Image: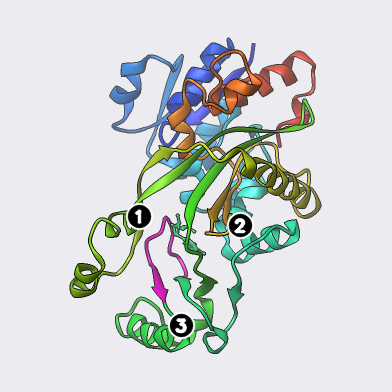
Amino acid sequence: MGCIATIGSHSALQILKGARMEGLKTLLLCPQGRESLYGRYGLADEIFTINGPEDLLQDKVQRELLKNEAIFVPHGTLISGGRLEEFEKNFRPPIFGNRRIFRWEFDRALKDRILREAGIRIPKKFDSVDDVDRPVIVKLPGAEGGRGYFIAKDGDDLERKMREVVRRGLLKEDEANKAFIQEYIIGVTIYPHYFYSPMLGRLELLGCDRRYETNVDGIGRICARDQLELDLIPTFRVIGNLPIVLRESLLSEVFEAGERFVAATERLVPPGMIGPFCLEMICDEDGKLYTFEFSGRIVAGTNLFIDGSPYSSLLFDEPMSMGRRICREIKLALVEGKIGKITT
Ligand code: AMP
């Protein structure tokens, strides 16, 4: 009954374990050299070695999935691999989730469009350096995972730093308009883990984390005088994830933002959100939530909650990781003969 396939990286272990717990077969597409890691846990019924995520489009990989009647569960590795338009069109096996959403996550302009459509609070975006009147964070084209970002305190500072970025060859002079300039929100980052269930017609909150980023999360350990003397530049490379439980009074807004996001994806990227997603938020000193990014699939922060989280235990009387929740939805759809409702 049913087979779950995923790539061996990111959140594969909890997906495999979740499939086991739900009584589904597992097929791991394992990047070469990682077989022994995944072998240690014995969670994959079958391991099919690939060179890397780029092999997903190869005929022999797709045939292996089709032969096993596998449902492919995407995660962060798929997005970072790029080639998402090709994947959307040419990947033949069924995917759990909406295969059209990944391109919107990868492309900053499309991402911005969905968040606007959702009508949730987002940091102000500046189309021109001349309009900048407050602290901003600049995301250079091609930058991801917080590398290639910098902060400027106002318009003059930004102009100076943009010149420096061009001088260092990080941005071509005629490409300055491609830098994504966004209001910098000072506050606490929070990353709620949502699951939208088409089978149950409900939005669930299964956990929440914060990313621990170097060096920005380390700078606060140094006193202000030393920070100035050391001439530090904040960077945002994710090193790990920390669990966070939110003030209960924030939950209504967290749910409302999630509901609005789901509705926006239904309008812009039909059939809309299926399964896990994350809104990347900052809560400022007034308790206002700003959403600055989204992930349209399982995020790595859910790896904290393989045994469930305080939020998942409010909904389920058993340990419910995001990986298991995905497999529970697939099982339900298989039993009810509605697999088309949750796959694309
Ligand atoms: P991202 O690659 O967009 O997920 O951003 C990486 C990190 O940069 C985030 O986890 C935040 O710490 C920081 N960041 C991004 N956008 C903003 C913003 N508008 N205001 C404050 N911090 C931000």
Name the residue located 49 percent from the left edge and 34 percent from the top edge.
302
Residue 208: percent from left, percent from top: 52, 38
Residue 225: percent from left, percent from top: 21, 71
Crowding around mark 2 (Cα neighbors within 10 Å: few <14, some 14 to 19, many 20+) is few
Mark 2 or 3: the one toward you: 2
Residue 241 seen in render: yes
Residue 36: percent from left, percent from top: 28, 23
The span picked out in magenta is 139-152
Distance CA(mark 2)–CA(mark 3): 22 Å
Is 269 situated above or below 299? below
Q: Which residue is mark 3?
A: 154
Q: Amino acid at mark 1?
A: Arg
Q: Is residue 144 magenta?
A: yes
Q: Quadrant of the C terminus?
A: top right
Query: Which tag, 3 or 1, sits closer to the chain's start?
Result: 3
Q: Is mark 1 within 8 Å of ligand 1?
A: no
Point out which mark residue 237 bears: 1
Point out which mark residue 229 bears: none
Crowding around mark 1 (Cα neighbors within 10 Å: few <14, some 14 to 19, many 20+) is some
Q: Amino acid at mark 3?
A: Asp
Mark 1 or 2: the one toward you: 2
The mark total stands at 3
